[in-house]
Amino acid sequence: MKRTLAAVSLALVACAAVAGAAERRAATIADLYRVKGVAEPAIAPDGRSVAFSLTTTDLPAVKRQTNLWRVGADGKDARALTASDKRDASPAFSPDGTVLAFLSTRGGEPQVYFLPVAGGEAEKKTDVPGGVGAFLFTPDGKRLVLTAEVWPECGADAACNRKRDEAMEKGKMKAAVADGLLFRHWDAWEDGKRTHLLLQDLADAKAPLRDLTPGDFDSPAFVVGGGADFDVSPDGRELVFTSNRDPQPATSTNSDLWAVPIDGSPGALAAPKRLTASNRAFDGTPRYSPDGRTIAYTMQRVPGFESDRIVLALLDRAAGTSRVLTESLDAWVRSFRFAPDGKRVFFTADVKGRTPLHALDLASGKVSVPSTVAHANPSEVSRPGR
């Protein structure tokens, strides 16, 4: 959502400037909705093309649709990949580059679909009750890690979740009873469900889903604006995610990083390892380094203070210690990505009303600004030489 809004804002500024020079009039709501939103770039493994989502709006019909496009890395040969009147978004290439996966509401609830890169029709790959919120391929491309809203007592049991959903829908009681906080997140009521991470085997369509984050907790934790607060280690053996497990999460900002073995026993999954226990404030957006030895993440240091400065930190997996990387930067760190060689981290930060791209050299700690673009977002970084 943030990337879409940024793209729309930039395009609107450009359109308004041209319109002002030609017609000398103020921009209108109609002008805003004529702008097409370009977002969610995904670089193909071979580095030759980029897939992205394109959102268009029909203001008179009060209708908006999102489809997938693909363009060459040189900016040429842009073409539509889907033409649904629903929402096709969140594109991601499989590790071997043969498939473009994405979330689609063409069947109702958002599910993961696979589109063969060589050509063909999109195929539905998940059937999760309530839909999929986000997904990630494991490094070998054989499994998917999904976020979904589940009943804690059901976990990954699809039949159990559907039964509970149907009981809620058909029940005569329509009142919402809240006996504790949190009972609402912005525009959504808390109904007892929790966000969990589920594992799906792609080789066996009949294989049951596995709940990787069981328990009465949101794992990953709720994030304003959405996002996927989880990652899989480069060797595919470990999952890191965020979760606030304080006794009173409504008054706490203490989201921590936790880790579990992806193929762990039920006991191991039910007892994740807490990686950031020493910090009583927010820790989030974990990303493994390419060699898997460290995890970069964003953090705050004042407990309970949501407006505290967000800094970039690095966790040494072997030592279990963390260090702040952007202490000298008087700005909030936003999105970030490791360079493929692991020697630098690209990130954006709010600086005087803009979000320029920054580059942090991990060896020296030096921060540079490689781009003068006013609003950037390092959604993806291509491999060297591509």
Image (cartoon, rainbow, N blue to C red):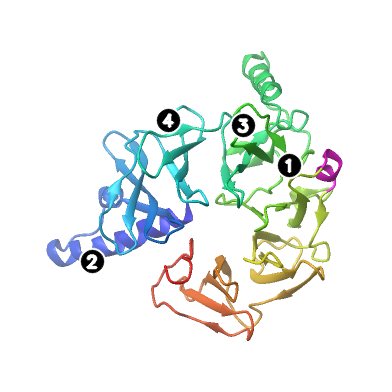
Say which of 88 and 349 sits in front: 88
Residue 252 shows up from this direction: no
Badge 4 amino acid: Arg
The part of the chain drawn in magenta is 265-271
Badge 1 amino acid: Leu
Res 385 quadrant in image:
bottom left
Residue appearing at x 38%, y 73% in the figure? 373
Report the Cα–Cα distance between label 4 and label 3: 24 Å
Residue appearing at x 47%, y 50% in the figure? 93
Badge 2 amino acid: Ala
Q: Identify residue for label 2.
A: 17
Work out whether mark 4 precedes mark 3 in sequence or the reverse, and give the earlier one.
4
Report the Cα–Cα distance between label 1 and label 4: 27 Å
Q: Identify residue for label 3.
A: 204
Work out whether mark 1 precedes mark 3 in sequence or the reverse, and give the earlier one.
3
Quarter of the image for the C terminus: give it. Answer: bottom left
